[in-house]
Every structure is written in structure tokens, then in C-alpha cells.
Amino acid sequence: RNDEQSYMSALFRGVRCIDLDVWDGINGEPVICNSKPANADDAVKPLLLVRVLKVIRHFLLANPKSFPVLINVENHCSFGVQKKMAHDLFDILGSEGLIVVPDETESMDEADLLPSPASMQGKVIVMGKRPRYIEEGCTVIHDDYDADNEEYYEDIVVSTRPLDDEDENDFGVDEAEKGIIIGFDASGPIRSTDPSMAQNMVQHTPGELVFLAKEEVDKARRAHDEVQSRLDAAVEAQKQADAKASKIIEDAGLRKEDVENLALAVTTSTLDPKAHADYLTRGEEEGVEVQEFFGGAVNDARQRYSEADQVSYRTVKAMSAALDALNEENERFDILQLQLRKEAEAHRNKNVAHHKAVTDHREKREHAITARERVETVRNMLKECQTTLASAENVVQTAKTEAKISEKRASDVENRTDRTLAASKKDRAKADEATKKEEDYERTAEAVHEQYRKAAVEEKAAKNQLEKAIAAMEKVTEEIRLIESSTQFKKERSMVSGHTHEHKDEFSANTNERPYLTKHTEKVHEKLQCAENVQIASSKASDAKATLQQCRDEFERSAHLWKRQAEQASQARKLADRTMQTGEAMAEHADEEREAANLRLVAYEKAKGNVALQKERKRSLQEQLAQAEKAAEEADKIAALAQKRVRETPENEEKQAVDTETLDLLQAQRVRRDEAQKVYQAKKAKKEEADKVLAEAKRLFETSSEVLNSAVANAKKEESRANIQTNASQNAVAAFNEAVEAQAAADHAAELANLSRSTLGEKEIAYRRACEYKEKLESVAEIPPALARMTFMNFTKHRYWDKSLNSPNTHIHSFAQGVIDRMSKGDTKHPEKLRQFTMEHMCRTFPSADGIHQRKGLNYDPVFQWALGCQLVAMNYSSFDNNILKTDGRFRRNGSCGYVLKPAYLIDPSETRIEREQHWQVNILCGSCLPLQVSYSKKNAATALSNLNPFVKAVVYEGLPDGHKRISEHRTRVIKRNGFFPVWDDKPGFSFSVQSPATSIIVFTVWDRDDQGTEQIVASSAVPLSCMREGHRSVALFDANNSRVGPYTHAKILVKTERTTS
């Protein structure tokens, strides 16, 4: 609920940190709501900030011994409303002295920088955005809203200072003086500071820069996808080549090692693969014996076949000669026919040649015009390049001058830094010497103080002894007075004084007859002894008092010297600290100047490279101009020649005339061709007769050779098998070489893919830098100095751990629940860095916006965050769930005051000992006076109590030191219809073990199960395991508001706890 009552209830419940989302109200007042109010008719009415501040004031004034209340202000207000917020804070809280104002002096005392909670009782600590320097017009960067902390920035190692390390007081102010941003790289914005080039550049808005960076990312991603597809194809080809090579090697019956050695031998020498393997070679002696056995018969058949073949050859030769003569005559006849056709064709082609010459002349003339236009284009490009080159040379000179100036400035700052650090060492040595003297005086004062203490003891003893002696003497005097005042004493004394002298001795001898007189005499002697004792004790007391006074004077003198030396040593240490702080600040400034000098040197080198590039472009354009001019001259000459050919080929009329002499020659050639045809037919008939004789001889020869061939076939088969094996080996080597080449191609494609992936990563980082720059420009806002001065704790956005660990102790980080989960599931260094950060800084966690807990209005498990050292865990107290119970139990250890001390290993970096594991046995015995449920409110109390069916759940939640969590659960049996005094007598009990007792919580919840099986919670209690003791323990039960009022006043359960081992 968003009302005053909910905040007051949370404060009295023990909440000491309140999150306030402050927005501009409809009437210009700062209001508290989850989002900016749209109008006055919103369903959720915003709450005025002043009402919550008054609630906090009322609580603190009523509870002045309360530990400080932290107000986390998430500021969404405009500057005017922020001034109103600062006025309300001071008017309601500051005027009462309730706001803890940060110490702005130069004190180095840790109590001034970060006071303890006990020293800030009854106060308010404001948390928000605080600039480094508070002055009129100071600004802050609102980049750490809860919505902005949903993402976890892992460490990005870059060569220059990251963009997010910019000082928020300088960011967004006089951006134009830093130069025009022309793009982004992995280091941040790329600026151009050359004034001569600024007027020719287009100054893009941050949104346009982000769009350009996104285009570069898309282009790099497309290139990467293309290279990746080629890589996939190469890998697939490599797999296919490997599979093919394996199959061929397996089919050949070889081993891969043999093929690899064979391929290596082939590539490293001139060895012929066909002759490499010994088993591939064969001899030629196998068919000799068969050939000698059938040699005679085969030779006779071969002789007859040879003679018939010679006759056939002569007839074929004669027929060929006749055929050649016939072909020669046919060829002459065809030539004459062709000549006759060409003469008729020539007359028709004269007009065609003229038209062709005209067309060619037109094309050549257009080409010449185009060549002259290209000359002009290249000449203009050359002029533009010369202008750009002159501008680039000016940039080089400017960058060189700036680099020299920056180098000199960096050297001067480094020299001053060295002198300051040397002076700091001297001051530190003086401070150490003064501290040593202070320690010497302190030891002397302690020794004198010891003497003074002993003298005081002796003086007191002497005084007591004197008092005792005086008291003894007074007692004896009183006894003497009593004796003298008695009647018996007077009688005895009169009797002694009344006897004559001669009878006095006789009377004196009889002492039994005068007891009072005898006692009086003894007391007089005792009084004399007491007087002597008083004198001795008085002398001792005087001496002891004089000694005590002397020791007191000596102690005061020693203490005065010690105090004076302590003041001098303190001043020396403060001077040394200030000098050291100045030296460190100057060292940081020297590093920044050196980094600036390096950046300007890089800019100078880039400018030189640009000049070289422009010179190379100028040379290329000069060459292109010369080539274009030469091409234009050649095109003009070709056009002139084409025009000349047009004039030389005039248009003629077509003539149809044929030469009579050519017709006569054609007729005579036809007669000679017919005669040659007759001769060829006669030679052909003789050739056919000779072929018949040759066929018979060939049949006899083939019959004789068949037996020989069948005998030689077996030898040929063996030779063929060897040839097949040789071919298989050759195929295996070739396939292996193809697989090697495919592997090399895949490796090359992988290198290209890695290169494109690296380029894509750089472009993505540059795009993120552009987005960060745009977001920072949009999130820079002015803050009133009055509000800034009241802000004690400064919320900063986490970027990388090295910066966070070195930040001041007053800086706070916020992490979403999802970010904490990703930390624990990723690299183990991130939970360790977070735990190290929380040892000296405060850390806040909150539920993720897209988490299931946030969507359902529930709370997330806080034990996990406590185990990592997080101090501020945001919880929603308007909803009641199991996690609220854990929170109540966690802070019940310290009386629900809102503050609990963390374990030693989460506070002290030198504390390496983790807690010992504990084993517990818990038995739930019985309950008493369980509260009634809403469904029973209208019934009789006794009847309602008898209708409860209670059972108990016991759940242990443990946050482990490594950032993970563990849950153990146990439940008892259901007791039917007994809510007044149910007895479970859980004899098996609940056994569990925990590794970190300091961050473990055991939650007891009492449930009611009706006849339909529906379960409803009745009461609950959470106990820190570090507070649990052995024996029979009564566990008090609480309601949803963590209170014991009404029906919960006497509700409790009885458990038996026992530590089995420790």
C-alpha cells in the first residue's frame, strides 16, 4: 500500500531502509509512486513526499535511540521539483537536526568519513546521487535506476579509458569544445578537433551515431555470416573428403599410416607412386615358356597371313590412289563452283560494306566523346584529391604540435608528482618519528601511572590502619570511661585509698576482691599502647600521602608531555596524509596527462597515415588521367580512320553479271571427274577380292593363336590384379591428398571466421559505446546543491570490479536479483569480487522487473544475498510470504532493530577461516493456544479451536559461502481437531546439517488442513540458526505483521533441539 500507515508500520516492525521513487506531481510537488503520474484520475494515487518525511520524523522523535533510518531516493524529478524536495527534507528533518550531513572537511579520520550506526542514532541518512564537486550548476548522471541495473556489465579489457569512466561532472558539458564525434570504436567516441575540417564535416546527433554504429554492426554481421557459411561448407567438404579417403583406403586394404607415408614420400621426392610398393611390381618371365611351345605353328600361320596382307595392302594402295585422284577432281570442280558463286556475291556485298563502315564510324565517334568526358572527370577528381591532401597535411602539423605540447605537459606533471611523493615520504618519516616519541611518552606515563596506583593503594592502606588504631584507642577510652563511671570501680578505688599503708600490701595481694580496678589498670596500659600505635600509623599515613602527591605530580607531568606529543604526532600524521593524498591525486593527474599524450600521438600517426593514403590516391589519379588522355587520343584516331573508310567505300548499284570463261572451265572439269570415277570403281573390285583371301589367312592365324592366347591369359590376369592394386594405391594417395587440401581449406576458412568474429565483436563494442554515450547524454541532469549536500551515500552504477573496489566507502551499488543469480552461475570470480566489495562498501539488491516474484507481487529469497555480504535487500512488506518470515527471523537476533552484524569472514579480508559445519536434530513436541483463523471468527472460540487440524513445517534455508543456497524441509503429522494443545511428539525428528550457521534460518510454520485437503497457514516463527540453543525450547509464534497481539499472545510450540556434532 502506498500510504503513511504502511511506512509507519514498517518502521515499527524494524525496517531501517526505505526505497522512495520520487516523481513530479501533478501540482508540482514531489510525490512517491512506481511511475510518473499521468493525471489526477490515476487508479493508484501518488503519495506526497512530505507525508512520508513527517512519518519518519515522528518515529525518530518518538524513538531517539533507534539506529539510523536510510532513505533511498530514486530521483526522477525535474530541477524545480528537486529544489522543492531539498526544501522539504531540510524543513522537516534537517531543521530538527535529524539528517546526517557528509563531512566536507579535510579530515582523514574514518569516523568522519563513515561514522558507525551507534554514533548516528536517531538520525536519517539520505542515499542518492551526489556529484564529486558541489557547486551551482553541478550535474549527475541518472544511469543507475533499478531498470538500468537489470544488466550485468562484465569486464571489458580495452587499451584506453572506458567511456563509462568519464567524470559525471564533466560529461555532457562543453561537448563541442572536445571536438566533433565522427564515430565510435571499442575505446569510445572518435573525435575530430581540426577546425579547418570541421566546416566540411556533418555533425551527427547521438541517435544518428547509434544508427551508423548499428549499420556497421549489421554489415560486419552479414560479412561474418557469409564467412561462417563458407566455413561450414569447407568443414562439410573436409568431412566428406575424410569419409571418401577412409572408404577408399579401406577398400584398398591399406592402413592410413601407410598411405600417409606413401603420400609424404611422393611429395618430398621424385618417386613414382606406381613403383613405390614392392608388392605392386611383377616379373615378365611367366609367359615365355608357353610362347616357345606354340611358336612354330603360330609363325607359319603368321607368314601366310602376312603374304595375304601384302597383297591386300597393294590393292588398297591402288584403290586409295584412284580415290585421291577422284577427290582431287571433285575438289577442283567445287572450287570452280565456289568461284562462280563468289563473283555473283561480290556485287551484292558492296552496299553492305558501305553501310557497315558508316555504323562503325558512328560507334567510334561516340567512344571518342566518352573518352574525352572521362578525362575531364579524372581531372576534377585529381583537383579534389589535391585539396584533401593539403587539408590532411595541415592536420598532420596540428596533431604533431598537440602531441609535443601534451608530451611536455605530461613530463612536467610527472616531475611535480615525483617531487610531491618525495615530500610525502619525508612527512611520513617525520610522522613516524613523532608517533614513536608519542609511544615512548605513553609508556613512560603508563609506568608513572602504575607507580601512582601503587602509592594510592599504600596510602589507602596506611589511612585504614590509622583509622583502625584511632578506633581501637577510642574504644579503649570508652571502656575506661564506662569502668570509671561504674559504682563498683568507685567502691574498689575508695577501699584502696582508705586502707593504711601497712595493710595496703595485704589488700593488693588479694586481686580477686578488686576486679574492676584490675581491669581499669589493664585498659589504661592498653590505651597507652593504642596511642603509640596511632602515632606510628599517623607517621606512615603522612609518608604515604606525601609519596602519593609526588606520584600524582609526576603522572600529571608525564601525561601533559604525552598529550602534547600526541597532538604533535596527530598533526604530523594528518600533514603526511594530506601530502600523500595530494601526491596520489597528482599521480592520477599524471596518468591522465600521459594517457592524453599517448592518444594525441596515436592521432598524429593516424594523420600521417591519412596523408600517405591521399598521396597514394593522387599518384593513382595522375596515372588514371594519363591513361584516360592516351585513350582519348587513340579513340580520336580510330574515329578518323573510320570516317576515312566511309569515304573510301561509296555506295554502288547491284550488278548481275557472270564470267563466260568460268562457265567453260566448270564444264571441262565435270568431264574429268566422271573419268576418275570409273577408274576408282575398277580398283575397288580388285581390293574386295584381295580382302577375301586376307580374311581366310586371318582365320587360320587366329585359330593358331587362340591356344597361345588362352595360355597367356592366366599370366595376364595376375598382371591385371597387380595393376588394380597399383591403381587403388594411387586413388588412396589422391584421396588422402584431397582430404589434406580440404583440411587446409577448412583451417583457412576458420581463420577468416575468427577474424570476422573479432571484427564483429569490435563493431558490437563500438555500438554499445555509442548507445552508452547516447544514454549518458540523456541521463545527465542538474541537481540543486542543497539536495546534493544532504546526500550522504552516493549510488553509482557498477561497470567493472577494479573501479568499484577502489571507489570511496560512501559509494553504493545496486544489483537486480537476476544479476546476482547470473553472477553465481557464471565465473566464480564474480561472487568473490562482490563479497570483497561488500567488506568496505554497501550493496543493495532488488527483485528483477521480469522475475516471477515481481509479477506476482511476492518477495525473493534474501538468504542468498546475505550470504554474499549484501547489506540492503529490498523486500515488499505489503505482501506476506515465506521470505518475509526469513527477514523477520534474521533481524530478530538483534531485537528487530534493523541492524545485524555480519559474520567475520564477510567483514575482515584477513579472516580466511569459514565456519565449521553443524549437525542438528530437532523434534517438534507440542503446541499451545494456536490462533483462530478468519473462517472461524464468527464461531465459538472453544469450538473453533477444536476444529483446527494443525501440523508444523520446519524448513532450513542456508546461504553457502560460495554464493549458492540449500534447503532442507520436514513436516509433522496432522493432529485432528485440536488447536488448543496439539501433541505431535515428533520422535523421528528432523536431522540436518549446515555449513554456514551465521547466514542460515530455520522457519517454523503452523498450518491447518481442512477436510477437503486445503492447507492454510496459522502462525509462523523464524529463528537464526546461530541463536538456536540445545534443550527443550519454547518457540513463540507471530502473525503476518511480525507481532504477538490478540490471539497470538500465548501462541507457541515446544521443540527439542540437539547438536549431534560440531
Image: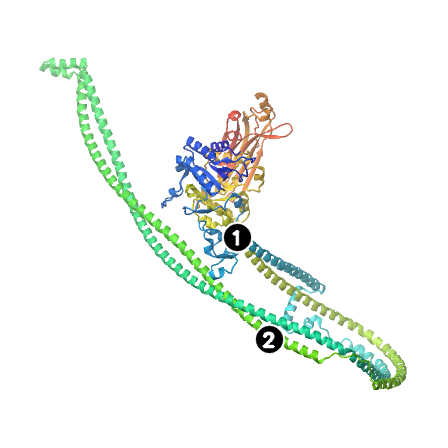
Q: Please tell me which residue lies in front, 99 or 828.
A: 99
According to the image, label 2 marks what residue?
A: 630
Name of the residue lying farthest toward the left: 501
Residue 646 location, x and y as percent?
70, 78
On the image, numbered disc 1 is attached to which residue?
206
Amino acid type for the residue under numbered disc 2: Lys
Q: Secondary structure at mark 2?
A: helix
* Residue shown at 62% from the left, 76% from the top: 634
Instruction: Tell me where residue 103 appears, x and y as whole percent.
Output: 38, 43
Q: What residue is drawn where x is 34% and y is 56%?
A: 419
| 954 or 892: nearer the viewer | 892
Label of residue 870 in the image: none
Residue 714 percent across, percent down from the top left: 79, 72
Relative placement, left or right, of 595 versus 728 is left
Cα distance between the residues tagged 2 and 1: 49 Å
Give above or below for 510 relative to 898. Answer: above
In the rendered view, would you say 990 is above or below 210? above
Helix, strand or loop at mark 1: helix
Query: Tag 1: residue type?
Result: Pro
In the image shown, does 518 or 447 lie closer to the viewer? 447
Q: Is residue 253 visible?
A: yes
Which mark is first along the chain, 1 or 2? 1
Q: Quadrant of residue 344?
A: bottom right
- Which is nearer the eye, 15 or 931? 15
- Above or below for 410 versus 815: below
Q: Residues within 10 Å of mark 2 (few under 14, many from 20)?
A: some
Residue 211 at what x, y percent from top left? Answer: 56, 54
> Is residue 443 visible in this depiction of the protein?
no
